[in-house]
C-alpha cells in the first residue's frame, strides 16, 4: 500500500498538482514593466537635448545683440520687414 501511495504522489508531483510544495520567492514582487516607459524616457532625453540647444541659441543671440550695440549696427526688427 505504501508503494502505491508513493507512486500516486510521484505522479501528482510530476503533473504539477502539488504546486503548493514548491518554494516561493520571498520579498516584494517586481513591478511590471510599463510598455510606454521606454518611449517616455526617449521623449524626456530629446526634450532635455532641445532645451540645451535652445539655451545655446538664446546665448548666441544675446551676444550678437550686445556686439551689434557696441559696434552701433542697426538691428533688423520684424517691423522693418513688413514695410
Image: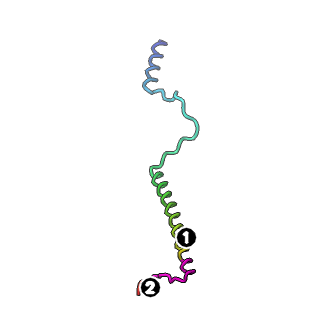
Q: Along the polypeptide, which appears first: circle 1 or circle 2?
A: 1
Secondary structure beneath label 2: helix
Q: What residue lies at 44% left-to-right and 23% top-to-bottom? A: 14
Q: Tag on residue 31?
A: none
Residue 62 drawn at (x, y percent)? 55, 74
Coloured how? rainbow
- Mark 1 residue element: helix
Write down the residue under mark 1: 59
- Residue 33 located within the stretch drawn in magenta: no
71 relative to 52, above or below? below
User: Which of 76/37 is in front?
Assistant: 76
Place of residue 78 in the rendered image (x, y in percent of width and height, measured from the top left): 45, 82
Report, in whole angstroms, how far the alpha carbon at label 1 lies from the one at label 2. Answer: 24 Å
Magenta stretch: residue 70 in it?
A: yes
User: On the image, numbered disc 2 is attached to which residue?
Assistant: 80
- 9 and 40: which one is in front? 40
x%, y% of residue 25?
A: 55, 34
Q: For the point 43% across and 21% down, which residue is it?
A: 11
Residue situated furthest left in the rendering: 83
Q: Give residue 80's quadrant in the image.
A: bottom left
Q: Residue furthest bottom?
A: 83
Camera-side residue: 29 or 66? 66
Question: Measuring 42% from the left and 25% from the top, which residue is drawn there?
Answer: 15
Amino acid at each position: 500500500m505504501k508503494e502505491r501511495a508513493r507512486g500516486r504522489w510521484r505522479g501528482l508531483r510530476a503533473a504539477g498538482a502539488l504546486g503548493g510544495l514548491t518554494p516561493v520567492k520571498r520579498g516584494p514582487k517586481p513591478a511590471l514593466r510599463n510598455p510606454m516607459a521606454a518611449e517616455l524616457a526617449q521623449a524626456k532625453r530629446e526634450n532635455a537635448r532641445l532645451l540645451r540647444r535652445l539655451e545655446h541659441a538664446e546665448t548666441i543671440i544675446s551676444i550678437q545683440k550686445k556686439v551689434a550695440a557696441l559696434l552701433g549696427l542697426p538691428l533688423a526688427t520684424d517691423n522693418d520687414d513688413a514695410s
